[in-house]
Image (cartoon, rainbow, N blue to C red):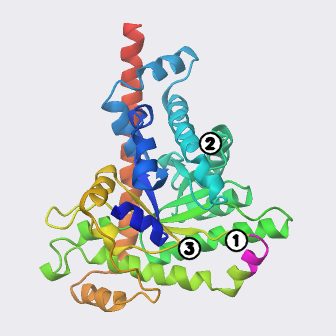
Amino acid sequence: MKATRALHDLGQSLWLDNITRNLLSSGTLRRYIDELSVTGLTSNPTIFDHAIKNSGDYDAGIRTQLGKGRSGEDLFFELALDDITRAADLFRPIHERTCGVDGWVSLEVSPLLAHDTKTTIAEAKDLHARAGRPNVLIKIPGTREGLPAIEEAIFAGVPVNVTLLFSREHYLAAAEAFLRGVERRIDAGLPPAVGSVASVFISRWDVAAMGKVPAALNDRLGIAVAKRTYKAYRDLLNWPRWLRACNAGARPQRLLWASTGTKDPKASDVLYVKALAAPFTVNTMPEATLNALADHGDVGAVLPADGGDCEQVLAQFAEAGIDIDGLAAELQDEGARSFVKSWNDLMEVIASKSAMLERTG
């Protein structure tokens, strides 16, 4: 049995952290679903930037949108929605079979809105309506300004993938925003089962700590933070307030491991996949990591619900001079800035390709 199937059977959802038009048209995504137990997909501005910049697959679509008078951000979202809805249709049978637990695809609001609550809410509603699929999650960053937008989106019935979470505290703030939205729906007599995942980024912790701690601690910080967050997740699932919402028909917001591609060339290429095996969670992994797992990976021990040794490990990092809370804030800010850079790069690619295609007819 492939490790991908073993991980799926353990109860963890495997999502692909990639989307390109070629993945869709070549049948590769379909194969990943059939052969590698992939049950969902995530995207971000960097992924779309690389996909559009490094191929001619989107040229015909750009020409079509230019003919309709679209440009810039509006043109991009038309291209992205085409890919996202095609992927959503592939995952729709899984979504229906699991009664909405799995089979999701994600599309992000403009990263320029990371600190703009009002416009984030409006764009999340608009993108979900334009997608017209029940299994599309709209990605909203779990920044201070993003949290009210998450609550409002959930209250409006828009499924949300909360992104850019880096710590237990970030996760708990996102979970609180989600639950407030659900409780407001219950109070308003609306169906409370609105899909959501909370995406905690892992590998960036270890990149940030590399060279600042003893070698024995290399590649251990992200996993320790994940274990601490997983304990909070399991505790929250037993929280009386949450159980009351479940009794009214709400669905839990699942914890998702993001940024699970190994960055350290000296470490295992499936380091974070093996270490973060846990039922009722999601691991969204880059294509190379997914294929490595299928080729030579194995499933490790299930994450302990009590966090295992996370506090002892985190104490060692504190002794080595790592301020966990301070670094979490830095990583979230850096993540937001990097997505803005990717977005700006993407808009430049759209503009240059548009100009070239208009010149060549």
Q: What secondary structure is marked by label 2? A: helix
Which mark, by number, is residue 180? 1
Left or right of residue 268: residue 308:
right
Query: For this rendering, which residue is in front, 87 or 256?
Result: 87
> Which range of residues does the magenta coloring cover?
244-249
Choose between 132 and 319: the one closer to the eye.
132
Q: Which residue is mark 2?
A: 127
| Position of residue 200 measured from the top left corner of the image (x, y, whole percent) | 44, 67
Horizontally, residue 108 falls left or right of residue 266, namely right
Q: Are marks 3 and 2 in contact (CB under 8 Å)?
A: no
Which sits earlier in the primary sequence, circle 1 or circle 2? 2
Q: Locate residue 276 relative to residue 120 in the image: left or right.
A: left
Point 37% across, 22% down: residue:
353
Q: What percent of the width, then of the height, locates residue 228?
A: 42, 83
* Residue type (three-letter) at the residue carrying disc 3: Ala
Task: Pick whichever of labels 3 and 2 is earlier in the sequence.
Answer: 2
